[in-house]
Amino acid sequence: MTKIEETRYVIGAEVHAGAVECGGLPPLLRYCEAVTGAFLTDVVAWLTEECTECGTSLRTASEARFRRDHVLLGRFVIVGCEGYWLVNPNAVGIPSEAWNDWRPHFGIE
Ligand SMILES: [Zn+2]
């Protein structure tokens, strides 16, 4: 996925955990850049192909619609369709005390 595509999807998504101010960039953009530039080992625990908010993935939903409603990094959902940040922002250098880990709700950990 190119930077241009990412930016388009970022604009289409809603900001949720967006109370974080970072480096002059809108929090959602900053988050997406941080996840994109992170080491795989730092974020792999939160990479999922399925949106935790609607339960769909690129494989089960219409691709165009899925791409419009979610922020993707490759095939992974990094922002859900309701704006939730799926990758722990604290793990990519964005302090976010209010962030709740989705994994326990799905029996992961
Ligand atoms: Zn979704």
Image (tube, rainbow, N blue to C red):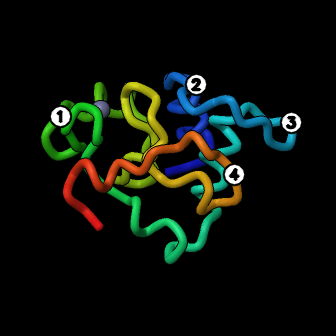
Q: Spatial distance from mark 1 to mark 2, Cα to Cα?
A: 21 Å
Determine the secondary structure under disc 2: helix
- Of tags 3 and 2, the one toward the viewer is 3
**Mark 1 or mark 4: whose residue is earlier in sequence:** 1
Mark 4 and mark 3 lie on one chain; the one further toward the N terminus is 3
Residue placed at 61% from the left, 39% from the top?
A: 4
Amino acid marked by disc 3 = Gly
Extreme residue toward the left, this view:
60
Residue 44: horizontal and vertical position, in percent? 43, 69
The quadrant where ligand 1 appears is top left
User: In the image, is residue 106 above or below residue 68?
Assistant: below
Residue ID for mark 3: 24
**Mark 1, residue position:** 61
The residue sitting at 59% across, 57% down in the picture is: 36
Q: Nearer the viewer, mark 4 or mark 3?
A: 4
Residue at image mark 4: 94
- Give amino acid for label 1: Ala
At label 4, which amino acid type do we have? Ile
